[in-house]
Amino acid sequence: MNGGLAPVDSRDLHHRTLLRYGLDHPNTLPLAEILSSWQAGFGVMPDWLGLGEAEFDRLHRYHFGPATSLRASPWQSRLDSRLDDLRDDLRRLLLLHARDETPSTAWIADILVTACQGSDHLWQDLGLWNRASLSRLLHWNFPALAARNTRDMKWKKFLFKQLCETEGIYICRAPSCEACCDFDDCFGPE
């Protein structure tokens, strides 16, 4: 599948190739990380990053041109189907706070919604290489929403908390985060 390369070496090779042809756009660098990780089996993203083959091809051509090619990932996706019901609401939340209405922003919203069904930190489920990449991605595409994360809450928890608050559901047991026994789960280092 990857020419006998170790997964990290395969990821790095894909990454270098994508960046060689990448469009000068703020989403290109994080997408190169996501795509190269997906090809090497890191993260939880399903085939075509959950976009469907046609939209995936549009994203790929837009950000990386026709000179590179990617195939469906041979890796098994590990998404929690119990969260399927929240996909539309989470996508709506993201797009309500989108920087613009470009296809790139919509693709990022769809990819994020899919990755939120993983069981690890959002940046890891996406296949990003660190949390800072995710923070930049969110701040670029959804600046008003990302700006609400003033206390550096873990992004997946933050997004679901925002979704609950939008729906008028307050699931936190404590009157403030500092008093909550799960404080480290939400705000501790990743």
Image (cartoon, grey):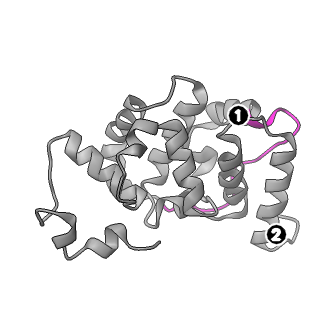
By secondary structure, the bulk of the magenta-drawn segment is best described as: loop
Disc 1 marks which residue? Answer: 57
The residues tagged by marks 2 and 1 sit, at their Cα atoms, a distance apart of 24 Å
Q: Residue, x 55% and y 32% (percent of image)?
A: 105
Q: Which residues are magenta?
A: 63-78
Amino acid type at image mark 2: Asp
Residue 49 visible within the image: yes
Q: Where is residue 104, by image quadrant?
A: top right
Locate residue 111 relative to residue 12 in the image: left or right: left
Q: Nearer the viewer, residue 189 or 107?
A: 189
Amino acid type at image mark 1: Asp
Residue 18: in magenta span: no
Disc 2 marks which residue? Answer: 9
Q: Residue, x 65% and y 53% (percent of image)?
A: 34
Marking on residue 161? none
In x, y percent, where is residue 160? 31, 51
Q: Residue furthest top?
A: 101
